[in-house]
Amino acid sequence: MAREAAAAELWGPPRLLRFEGRDGEATTLAIADRDAAAWAEAIDARAGLATLPGLALCLRLLALVELLARAPALAGLYRIGPEGAEFHPALIAAAAAIPLDAAARFDAERLQGLISRSIPAEA
């Protein structure tokens, strides 16, 4: 979806997401990077960022892409190229199973631990 949006130059606007905490503290997340905005625009068009499932999908996908940039141990579990992205099912399952932290990021060690339990060592 994001590749199609980028090819059509539908980058999408920068977005600010504000979450009110139970303690009254607010957390604001900015989706300002051009590629991240394209992902958000594509997800908004398909699933709707005004819906909880659409917002969750957007934040989890952006968190996964961010994680891949800082977790070299995951390199064999995905491929991103001009034709699109492919992810190992265990990577997607782990990203769907663990929570995001307060900064909307995945805990790399926790995610890798979950994956290591789901993929046999000889794989």
Image (cartoon, rainbow, N blue to C red):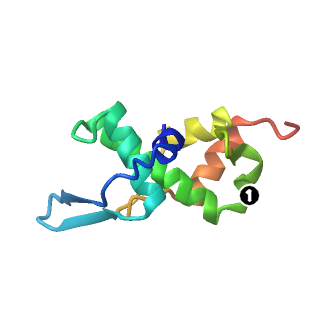
Task: Give the residue at x 32% y 64%.
Answer: 30
Q: Is residue 40 left or right of residue 110?
A: left
Extreme residue toward the right, this view: 122
Q: Is residue 25 left or right of residue 8?
A: left
Q: Secondary structure at mark 1?
A: helix
Q: Position of residue 25 (x, y in %)?
A: 16, 68
Extreme residue toward the front, this view: 8
- Out of 57 and 34, give the one closest to the viewer: 34
Task: Give the residue at x 74% y 53%.
Answer: 75
Extreme residue toward the left, this view: 24
Q: Is residue 86 left or right of residue 67?
A: right
- Out of 35 and 68, give the one closest to the viewer: 35
- Residue bearing the label numbered 1: 73
Vertical relation: 50 (above or below) 47: below
- Out of 101 and 43, give the one closest to the viewer: 43
Task: Give the residue at x 57% y 58%.
Answer: 67
Task: Give the residue at x 33% y 35%.
Answer: 45
Binning the other alpha carbons within 10 Å of mark 1 as few (below 14), some (14 to 19) or many (20 upward) gives few
Vertical relation: 54 (above or below) 65: above
Query: Can see residue 103?
Result: yes
Q: Position of residue 10 (x, y in %)?
A: 40, 47
Q: Position of residue 114 (x, y in %)?
A: 62, 44
Callout 1 amino acid: Ala
Q: How many marks?
A: 1
Residue 36, picture quadrant: bottom left
Vertical relation: 21 (above or below) 10: below
Q: Is residue 21 left or right of residue 83?
A: left
Q: Position of residue 56 (x, y in %)?
A: 35, 42
